[in-house]
Image (cartoon, grey):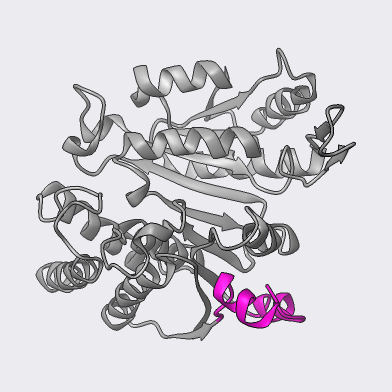
Amino acid sequence: MYRFAIMPGDGIGPEIVREGMKSLEAASEIFGFKYEAIDMPYGTDHYLDTGVILPDGVFDELRQMDAIFLGAIGDPRVETGLIERHIIAGVRFTLDLYINLRPIQLYAEHLCPLKGISTSDIDFTFVRENTEGAYAQLHGFFKKGTADEISTQQMLYTRKGVERTIRYAFDLCKKRNKKNRLTLVDKANALRSHDIWTRTFEEVAKEYPDIETDHAYVDACGMWMLKNPNWFDVIVTTNLFGDILSDIGAMLQGGLGIAAGGNIHPGQVSMFEPIHGSAPKYAGKNVANPLATILSAGLMLDHVGESEAALAIERTVQELLASGKVPDLSARSGLKTDQIGDMVVEELRASQEARA
């Protein structure tokens, strides 16, 4: 019996989480696992109604869960970043979810904006450090609002934080057993604080002689992702660079509508979410594509040990996209949010019956 905290959040969040839960329920019936869904209705509406973003004791409650399933956070009715800092960043930092995992895989060739690319050319994963770097909340203002205003933001890296991220990336590369190539992305030539990444990577690599290592500066990596995406297997990088590059990767696979993500502390409660935003202009219209959320549910199942169910969900999404049953990932596809969710459930059941 798994315990999942369900946080639909803002904007399209409730709609896409609803469809993710359909797939989760179908998978539980097919593969024989049970779960309890604990509703946690925290987001902008809750804040505007109560004046509280997250109640006291919520992190103690979250620590008792097996995973957290998040929809999307963000609403123009409040200060930019207010809810995100307290919920997304709050959960990441408080629960020490030090890995941000973002798989990049092309499921259907017509979704890729690059010409001459096959599905086998784009299959790699970002391992993004998730609790340090430029997002460590070390910032400030001096003489704010004046002509002499100064704004600062510090990047912070620890040996512990860097090393555990790099080790996770090496282990993931070994587990994937595909190209067995791990690429470190930093900017150590210009940002000398990144030397801690370069040195730690070289030291840890000695313990993984079967893994080929590669190093790229962030600008070169962005170029090669467009020119030769088939080069990459696993990419490990900083918080800021991982955030930017994985969004580029999402576009290579068809867009943010299919990009799933995990905020992970191995062996502990972790959080899974689509990497796109809350898209307030589409809220309540039943037009948002839920596939990124459904794939995030698959990542969550893989994290708790239900790898067969996770793989089945991924194969189902791949089949719907490759066959053209879901023609594209935009709100203009002609398919409603709940229609796509129902299609995933129907295909998931049919494919498992066929395999049986």
Q: Is residue 11 above or below residue 229?
A: below
Tally the marks.
0
**Image quadrant where residue 46 sits:** bottom right
Q: Inspect the magenta stretch and tell me whether residue 356 lies in it.
A: no
Q: Position of residue 11 (x, y in %)?
A: 44, 65
Q: Which residues are magenta?
A: 40-64
Q: Is residue 356 above or below residue 196?
A: below
Q: Position of residue 310 (x, y in %)?
A: 36, 63
291 left or right, relative to 109: right
Q: Is residue 137 above or below residue 346?
A: above
51 left or right, relative to 279: right
Q: Inspect the magenta stretch and tell me whether residue 58 lies in it.
A: yes
Q: Position of residue 311 (x, y in %)?
A: 32, 59
Q: Position of residue 288 (x, y in %)?
A: 30, 60
Residue found at the very far front of the displayed protein = 146
For the residue pair 77 and 260, the one nearer the viewer reads as 77
For the residue pair 107 and 85, the one nearer the viewer reads as 85
**Image quadrant where residue 208 sits:** top right
Query: Which residue is at a point 39% across and 71% down the rendered structure image?
Result: 17
On the rendered image, what quadrant is the C terminus found in?
bottom left
Residue found at the very far right of the displayed protein = 143
Query: Which residue is at a point 21% across and 60% down the rendered structure image?
Result: 316
Query: Which residue is at a point 78% across and 47% down the rendered structure image?
Result: 137
Query: Which residue is at a point 51% across and 15% down the rendered structure image?
Result: 220
